[in-house]
Amino acid sequence: MSESDLIAAARECDECVCWLEHCEAECCRVFTFHLTLRSDVAFGKDEVRLHTVMTPDMKRYYELHGAKVEGDWVIVPRNACRTTLDRLDVYLTCRELRDDNLCGLHKRGKPRACADLTLETADSGEWSITPRCLYVYKLKARAE
């Protein structure tokens, strides 16, 4: 689909489930840390350790993706990471993502980090939305 077709399709889609054919649950396969000069990150030979404020919900979210959590440290395999100047993307798939790209926790309660994503929160800068996310195209549609 062209960019304009995706923007038009996003106007008709009210929830992530109808967008799966375009994004393939990209957000369930990667999570991001925003990096600043104050970020406490240690790059080891085989792992990356990042210090962050940890809530019980975020601990659950990271562990669902296969990350280790020790106190306020998230520990991930170095080979699962891609870094840029201002972000660390961790490519670990949530263990509750089913083969049909639906969430196995949908009726039992997704982590708040997943359940709270809306157009308004996506536009707040608090979240990192993935390139093929529905909300990327909803924001583009809003800008037109």
Image (cartoon, rainbow, N blue to C red):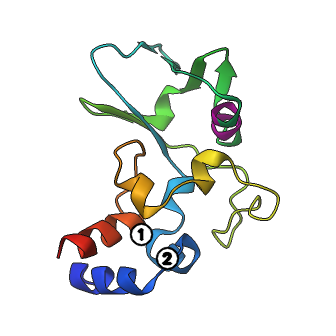
* 14 vs 109: above or below: below
Viewer-proximal residue among 4 and 89: 4
Is disc 1 surrounded by few (<14), some (14 to 19) or many (20+) residues within 10 Å?
A: many
Name the element at disc 1: helix
Q: Which residue type carries mark 2?
A: Trp
The image position of residue 66, as x and y in percent, is 67, 37
Please state the horizontal and vertical placement of residue 27, each as a whole percent of the image. Answer: 51, 55
Q: Residue at x 29, y 22 (%)?
A: 36
The C terminus: image quadrant: bottom left
**Residue depicted at 80% across the width and 65% down the height:** 107
Q: Which residues are magenta?
A: 58-63
- Residue of label 1: 134
Count numbered badges in the picture: 2
Image marks 2 and 1: residues in contact by CB distance under 8 Å: yes
- Residue 110: which numbered mark, if any? none
Q: Kindly report the distance in space between the C-alpha atoms of the residues bearing marks 2 and 1.
A: 6 Å
Q: Quadrant of residue 70?
A: top right
Q: Which residue is mark 2?
A: 19
Question: For residue 106, what is the image quadrant?
Answer: bottom right
